[in-house]
Amino acid sequence: MKRIPSSFYFLYVIASISIAACGDDSTGTGAGVKPLAAVASGRSASPGKPSAPISLDYEVLGKPIVGLPVAINITVKAAQDIGPVSLQYSIIDASSLLFQEGQVERLEIANLVDNGMQQVTVVPQREGRLYVNVSAEVQTPGGSMIKSMAIPIQVGNTPQRPQINGELKQGPDGEIVISMPAEEN
């Protein structure tokens, strides 16, 4: 009995998967295969993680100052009528940023066409880069989908310097690297 090499099975499996990915073309119309032009033009859905059919945009109004309320316009858009959208605002670090008294933190927008613009007001408690998180949830035929974003608010004139963890050292080839040795307990 002759033995077939394992590499043959590997190629057989890859070929089978490739053919199956093209779809069922038993009608001869090519319906299972997307034209290259459709893929190149972006009309094809991404093969990655599905995304909610909405977009979020924002505008910080005025110059944020510590202790004074700052308004942020948030625009929620959809390419089609998708039904109600649940919008939620949150702040991770309450010591640096607070919602203005009476600010609604969760609301439902029944119709984006008439009411896609919302405003949230926050009060910065310190200088630096602060963030307001916004999440929009919508029900789709595939289930509930959420689109989220963090809105950066630059308060004051504090320079935006990233904090370096570790220590800068020169490696054996002359390249500068960040050394982060393990800590002893």
Image (cartoon, rainbow, N blue to C red):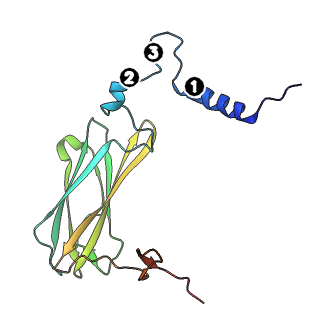
Looking at the rendered structure, the kind of residue marked 3 is Gly
User: Label 3: how many residues lie within 10 Å, few (<14), some (14-19) or many (20+)?
Assistant: few
Looking at the rendered structure, the kind of residue marked 1 is Ala
Determine contact: label 1, label 2, CB under 8 Å: no
Is residue 156 shown above or below 151?
below
User: Label 1: how many residues lie within 10 Å, few (<14), some (14-19) or many (20+)?
Assistant: few
Which residue in the structure is indicated by mark 1?
Answer: 20
Is residue 81 shown above or below 28?
below
In-image side of 146 versus 185 (left or right): left
In-image side of 7 versus 25 (left or right): right
User: Label 2: how many residues lie within 10 Å, few (<14), some (14-19) or many (20+)?
Assistant: few
Picture coordinates of residue 35, whole percent (x, y): 38, 22
Picture coordinates of residue 150, whole percent (x, y): 31, 62
Q: Which quarter of the picture shows residue 131?
A: bottom left
Marks 3/2: CA distance? 9 Å
Is residue 21 shown above or below 138?
above
For residue 119, say whether it is visible: yes
In-image side of 12 versus 110 (left or right): right
Q: Nearer the viewer, residue 128 or 94?
A: 128
Q: Nearer the viewer, residue 56 or 14?
A: 14
Of the image marks 1 and 2, the number of the one nearer the N terminus: 1
Marks 3/1: CA distance? 13 Å
Which residue in the structure is indicated by mark 2?
Answer: 35
Picture coordinates of residue 96, whole percent (x, y): 29, 79
SS class of the residue under badge 3? loop
Of the image marks 3 and 1, the number of the one nearer the N terminus: 1
SS class of the residue under badge 1? helix
Is residue 74 shown above or below 37?
below
